Image: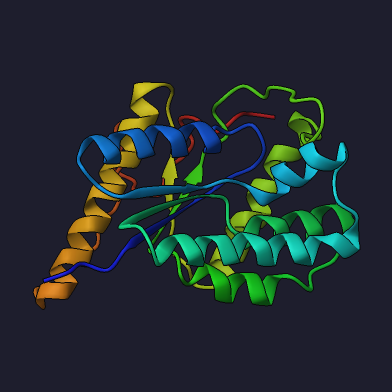
């Protein structure tokens, strides 16, 4: 019985380790023998190619190209790790240009994603010279991402910690998503996995790593 491909969307504000996490997860899944594709961030490619961030009228094409690449990878690989989805482009269009017109299409496209990982704000901000706006942008962007996911009724798992702990946190979610896919295919549903804070019994608690203003 063939199992449908698993698409993992990695979302997060700038400098929260999305690309690093995508590469680490890819290496782990490849070591297990899976056919893995990492879909890079189209926005970053645009910034590197043009030496600037995109204008408002260029955002939609970037979002659509991100979704197109994810779908193409989904047709060829068993695991797709998307280093952001069109939803991030919609969020930045909202934050920078006060343009909310990209959300509807981005939310529809994001439904191709089986597991959404949201990278926490517990890593230090690092400048990259072109794309990043500053540490002050991270909290409002994180809030917009969460609001968009809530509006679209899209579940997500927060990935926090440093180094191997961050990777291990993501792997727990990915492994469970794979088990859910297998169970669904076989007709034996499992209970959804829920992250539990290791410092208290509140599954929605993030107070132990969120920065304090």
User: Where does residue 195 sit, x and y in percent of width and height?
Assistant: 31, 47
Q: In the picture shown, does residue 95 fall above or below 192?
A: above
Can residue 40 be seen? yes
Q: Which residue is drawn at 20% across and 39% down?
A: 32
Residue at (80% x, 61% y) in the render:
59
Residue 120 in the image: above or below residue 73: above
Name the residue rendered at 54%, 36% in the picture: 19
Can you say whether 137 is above or below 181 in the image?
above
67 relative to 32, above or below:
below
The part of the image, by quadrant, that contains residue 55 is bottom right
Q: Is 207 on the left-hand or right-hand side of 131?
A: left
**Along the line of sight, the residue nearer the viewer: 209 or 83:** 83
Of all residues, the one furthest to the front in this rendering is 76
Q: If the image is split into quadrants, where does the C terminus sit?
A: top right
Q: What residue is at 77 percent from the left and 46 percent from the top?
A: 46
Along the line of sight, the residue nearer the viewer: 133 or 59:
59
| Res. 197 in view | no
Q: Position of residue 171 (x, y in %)?
A: 29, 40
Task: Report which quarter residue 167 is drawn in.
Answer: top left
Whole-percent x, y for residue 49 in the image = 80, 40
């Amino acid at each position: 019985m063939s199992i449908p491909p698993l698409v993992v969307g990695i979302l997060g504000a700038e400098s929260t380790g999305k690309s690093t996490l995508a590469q680490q997860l890819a290496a782990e899944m490849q070591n297990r023998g899976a056919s893995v594709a990492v879909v890079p961030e189209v926005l970053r490619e645009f910034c590197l190619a043009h030496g600037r961030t995109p204008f408002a009228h260029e955002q939609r094409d970037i979002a659509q190209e991100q979704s197109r690449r994810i779908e193409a990878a989904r047709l060829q690989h068993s695991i797709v790790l998307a280093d952001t989805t069109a939803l991030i482009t919609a969020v930045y269009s909202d934050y920078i240009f006060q343009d909310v017109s990209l959300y509807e299409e981005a939310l529809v496209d994001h439904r191709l994603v089986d597991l959404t990982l949201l990278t926490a704000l517990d890593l230090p901000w690092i400048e990259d010279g072109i794309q990043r706006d500053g540490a002050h942008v991270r909290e409002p962007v994180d809030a917009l991402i969460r609001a968009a996911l809530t509006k679209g009724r899209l579940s997500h798992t927060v990935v926090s910690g440093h180094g191997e702990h961050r990777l291990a946190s993501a792997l727990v979610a990915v492994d469970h998503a794979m088990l859910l896919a297998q169970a669904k295919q076989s007709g034996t549903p499992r209970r959804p996995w829920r992250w539990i804070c290791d410092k208290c019994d509140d599954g929605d608690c993030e107070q132990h790593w969120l920065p304090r203003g």
